Image (spheres, helix red, strand yellow):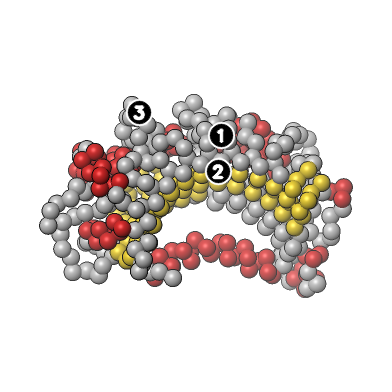
Amino acid sequence: MVRAPCLLLLLLPVLCVFATTPDPCEVDDDDFRCLCNFTDPQPDWSSAFQCMAAVEVEIHGGGRSLEQFLKATDADPKQYADMVKALRLRRLTVGSAQVPAVLLVAFLRALSYSRLKELTLQDLAVTGAMPPPPLEATGPGLSTLSLRNVSWATGGDWLAELQQWLKPGLKVLNIAQAHSLAFPCSQLRTFQVLTNLDLSDNPGLGEHGLTAALCPHKFPALRALALRNAGIQTPNGVCVAMAAAGVHPHSLDLSHNSLRATAPGAPGCVWPSTLNSLNLSFAGLEQVPKGLPAKLSVLDLRCNRLNRMPGPEELPKVSNLTLDGNPFMDPEAPKYQEDPMNNGVVQACARSALAVGMSGTLAVLQRAGGFS
């Protein structure tokens, strides 16, 4: 067997050995999706060769350190550029590993020759300092970057440093369960074409954290901002943070937060005139918050605790208002309210909220069980 350059477990994980353990990688019948779980104590990394024809690849490293691949960082990615260009790879997920920062950079440099568009990093610990930035733009030309539960030794500098190893053109950025979202704004480059920013599932963020994360004038093209389960307390606080950052989204998702009324004496805020869709579902609201935008195309108030139909004076001028799942809409609501275990929440909404919370667990179970 010819020894291939072991650039990274994350791209072409090759250790030229034979193993008797069960094959850790599975490819579907159409060679479209490939899933690898390297959980064995002595994994056969060469099994990942099966993924070379796949469009979607998902690799999980079993939580182990990838330092053994550091020797691959000395290789010049140009020597295997033609091979990487030939890959069908469009969507890649890498998870469950401890990755030296220099190895991550080598991985991104190799992907600069690929046609990869969507990259997901999850349950990773990036160790050590990032290498000095390149002299010119390198790395993959991603349209979507998603990060979930990724820790960085560099602390809050991580996004600015990672950004230097990606080509411009990112349109969608999802960051969940982040260890730090307090970015040094002076080091962060402008995301010129980023339209979707999702900071959901960061329960410690809150309005103050949002102000630190939304660096002023770094997101000029932003159209959709999602802040589900992000520790948000009031819509007005989000309005203030967006105004400070100079962002003008068209849609704002504040669902699955425990929202409350704006405190008396809080500074007023002028909502962006571009905002036409506001999601306040699953927010525990007992009344419509004051100070909402004067006009909206869509207002979602599903699955709150509204006991009566809001009056016209309480609502913005809205074309599409959704109130399903509130107690006053359900004939069985009095029964739910008498039960202290329901907290006034309609049962259908409680089941839906539980499904949202279980979605990550179900995804893990599906990966562990193969394809579904």
- Give me the residue at 57% from left, 62% from top: 356
Going from N to C along the chain, the mark reached first, 1 or 3, is 3
User: Which of the two marks, 1 or 3, is nearer to us in this view?
Assistant: 3
- The residue at which mark 1 appears reads as 219
Q: Are marks 1 and 2 in contact (CB under 8 Å)?
A: yes
The image quarter containing residue 206 is top right
Q: Position of residue 323 (x, y in %)?
A: 76, 59
Residue 267: image location, x then y, percent: 74, 33
The answer for how far apart the CA atoms under marks 1 and 2 are is: 9 Å
Which mark is first along the chain, 2 or 1? 2
Residue under numbered circle 2: 197
Please, what secondary structure does the residue beneath circle 2 have?
Answer: strand
Residue type pointed to by label 1: Phe
Picture layout, residue 267 above or below residue 261: above
Compared to residue 148, the image places residue 222 above or below, namely: above
Classify mark 1: helix, strand or loop: loop
Q: Which mark is residue 136?
A: 3
Q: Amino acid at mark 3?
A: Glu
Mark 2 and mark 3: span between their CA atoms?
25 Å
Q: Position of residue 288 (x, y in %)?
A: 78, 51
